[in-house]
Amino acid sequence: MELNIKTKSKGNIHILDVQGEIDLYSSTMLRDYIFTTIKQPHPKILIVELSKVTYIDSSGIATLVEGLQLANEYDTRFKIAGLSQIVLEVFQLVRLERVFDIYPTEEEALKASQEIEDRS
C-alpha cells in the first residue's frame, strides 16, 4: 500500500495524518514531511497521526526517532497518536513506547496539546 500523508494545522499545532505502509522505500517521504514541518516557522507541537498505518519497519522507526531528535533541537513537542496494535507492538519490541509521547487518538493528543498551549 502506498504511503499517503496529509497535513493540517490548528494554531501552533501541526498534524501529519499518515496512511499506508512505512518501509525502507516510503520512510524518506515521511522524513521529508516531518523535517519540513518542524523547520517551517516551526510549530510548537507536531502530532504524527498513525492510526491508518498498517505496517512499519525499522527504517520507519528510525525516521520517527530522527524526527523526535530534530523536534528537540527546534524546541518542538513531538507526539504520536493512534497506533494500531500491530504498530504499537513494534514500538514495544524496541522499547520506544517509553521514549515517545504516545496518545491513543489524535483527539487526545490535541487535548493534551491545547492544555500545554493554554499554560504557555
Image (cartoon, rainbow, N blue to C red):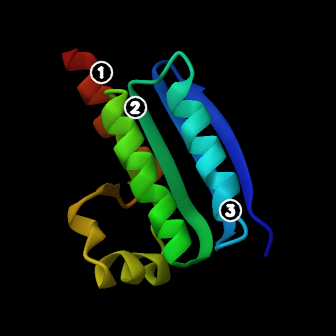
Give coordinates of residue 87: x percent, y percent. 47, 77
Q: Secondary structure at mark 3?
A: strand
Q: Which mark sits nearer the N-terminus, 1 or 3? A: 3
Give the image location of residue 55, x and y in percent. Answer: 60, 79
Mark with earlier residue (1, 2): 2
Measured Cα–Cα span from mark 1 to mark 2: 9 Å
Q: CA distance from mark 1 to mark 3?
A: 27 Å
Q: Which is nearer the N-term, disc 3 or disc 2?
A: 3
Out of 70 and 7, give the one closest to the viewer: 70
Q: Residues within 10 Å of mark 2 (few under 14, many from 20)?
A: many
Disc sitting over residue 19 in the figure: 3
Instruction: Using the rendered image of the protein, determine whether residue 110 is visible from the camera's viewpoint.
Output: no
Say few, some or many: other residues with alpha carbon within 10 Å of mark 3 (under 14 / 14 to 19 / 20 or more).
some
Residue type, numbered disc 3: Gln
Tell me which residue sits at (46%, 68%) in the image. Answer: 61
Which is nearer the eye, 64 or 10? 64
Residue in the image at 45% along x and 68% along y: 83
Amino acid identity at mark 1: Glu
Q: Is residue 33 left or right of residue 51?
A: right
Q: Secondary structure at mark 1?
A: helix
Query: Which residue is disc 1 drawn over?
Result: 117
Q: Which residue is denoted by mark 2 in the rendering?
A: 45
Q: Tell me, yes or no, if residue 118 can be seen here.
A: yes
Looking at the rendering, in which quadrant would you find the N terminus? bottom right
Q: Position of residue 63 (x, y in %)?
A: 51, 59
The answer to whether residue 55 is above or below residue 69 is below
